[in-house]
Amino acid sequence: MASDNPVLCPSAQPEWPGAQAIGVMAGTADKPEMAYLNAPQPVTGQLLEMAGSVSPAEVFRFSAPCACKGCGHYVEGESRCRLAEKVVRLMPTVTEQLPVCAIRSECRWWRQEGRAACFRCPQVVTNNLKPTEEMRLAADYSVL
């Protein structure tokens, strides 16, 4: 994994250092689906204002350098993300083709879980106010 580029978390918060928008959430609250951006966009005040009265992480998906041991999903000794594992294990696939993704080569989920993560990624909403039971379990730090 020797690279000048950091490994990126595909479900980051906009205030994280190095955050960039990678998609816009579309679909419905019951069936969200990310529309991937052609290229990551910098997080600016103007971008964040586009979310209106809701949290930007409800409207956009952000990537940022993986926080590693600063994240409750990260298993330090094994350099892996439990969230990626649980998304693959618990959530259904929502596509049979790899989405066109601008961060795939640096994405922690891709590097760790491969295609299986990409087949589930479009439904992940970082700040989801109406998660499915599977997504709630995947996001819960205490669930292994």
Image (cartoon, rainbow, N blue to C red):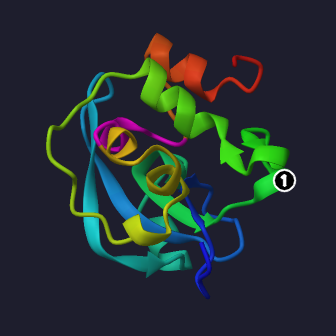
> SS of the residue at dot 1?
helix
Quarter holding residue 61:
bottom left
* Residue 47, above or below 144: below
Quarter holding residue 73:
top right
* Residue 118, above or below 111: above
The residue pinned by badge 1 equals 70
Secondary structure, magenta segment, majority class: loop
* Magenta span contains residue 123: yes
Say which of 14 and 76 sits in front.
Answer: 76
Relative placement, left or right, of 14 versus 134 is right
- Farthest residue to the top: give it: 133
Residue 2 placement (x, y as % from top left): 62, 80
* Magenta span contains residue 72: no
Residue 52 placement (x, y as % from top left): 45, 56
Relative placement, left or right, of 15 versus 107 is right
Relative placement, left or right, of 122 versus 62 is left
Span of residues in magenta: 119-126
Q: How many marks?
A: 1
Position of the C terminus, as image quadrant, is top right
Say which of 126 and 49 sits in front.
Answer: 126
Residue 67 placement (x, y as % from top left): 75, 59
Position of the N terminus, as image quadrant, is bottom right
Q: Residue at x 46, y 43 (%)?
A: 113
* Residue 32, above or below 10: above
Q: Is residue 130 visible?
A: no
Q: Residue at x 33, y 72 (%)?
A: 102
Say which of 19 and 69 sits in front.
Answer: 69
Q: Is residue 44 visible?
A: yes
Q: Residue at x 44, y 54 (%)?
A: 110
Residue 13 placement (x, y as % from top left): 62, 56
